[in-house]
Amino acid sequence: MTEARRYTKTHEWIAPANVQGEWNVGITDFAQKEVTDVVFVELPKVGRSVPRGGEAAIIESVKAAFSIYAPVAGTIVAVNPDLDSDPGLLNRDPYGKGWIFRLKAVQPEEIPVLMDEGAYQKFLKEGGGHPEHG
């Protein structure tokens, strides 16, 4: 699955969901370490269309609040209900159970423009590791 996962410079990831044409979005392991202990997630409204780079959700940690941006344009078709009762999933399993929302109706050509795992790791090594959030 990691080959299919793509990353943004604002430390979101997007990967194919189990449903054809739908994509899960979350924050990277790097981001969850920077954010520290997540205490609340303001989830987006299902049915809302978001532009690429548009604010989709807000994560609150013991440190601050951080905006989460849509890696690509699309329509929000699901949110992770487990984050309401257990926001710490973002810290414990950022690439699995800690997904934040799911998009569909994305433009397929927007996905390859995002960084793959190798490019993202290189970006972090080159000092791109300061979240541009909030």
Image (spheres, helix red, strand yellow):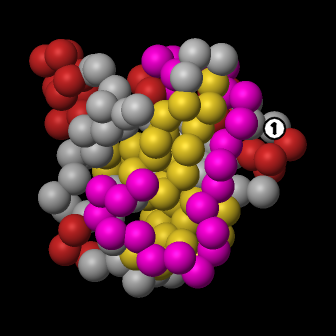
- Asked if residue 64 lies left or right of residue 124, the reply is right
Q: Look at the image and give the residue range highlighted in magenta.
A: 32-55
Residue 96 in view: no
Residue kind at label 1, given as amino acid type: Asp
The quadrant where residue 91 appears: top right
Can you say whether 7 is above or below 107 in the image? above
Quadrant assignment for the C terminus: top left
Query: Is residue 64 in the magenta section?
Result: no
Pick the front one: 59 or 24: 59
- Asked if residue 46 lies left or right of residue 105, the reply is right
Q: Give residue 33's position: percent from left, percent from top.
A: 51, 18
The quadrant where residue 92 appears: top right
Q: Give residue 102's position: percent from left, percent from top.
A: 55, 66
Q: How many marks?
A: 1
Can you say whether 118 is above or below 74 in the image? above
Residue 47 in view: yes
Query: Is residue 39 in the magenta section?
Result: yes
Residue that badge 1 annotates: 86
Tell me which residue sits at (58%, 38%) in the image.
Answer: 59
Tell me which residue sits at (66%, 62%) in the image.
Answer: 79
Can you say whether 69 is above or below 62 in the image? below
Tell me which residue sits at (13%, 18%) in the image.
Answer: 126
Outermost residue toward the right in this view: 85
Residue density around tag 1, few if under 14, some if 14–19, many if 20 or more, within 10 Å: some
Q: Give residue 122's position: percent from left, percent from top.
A: 17, 26
Tell me which residue sits at (51%, 47%) in the image.
Answer: 26
Can you say whether 110 is above or below 98 in the image? below
Q: Give residue 121's position: percent from left, percent from top.
A: 25, 27
Judged from the image, the secondary structure of the residue bearing numbered disc 1 is loop
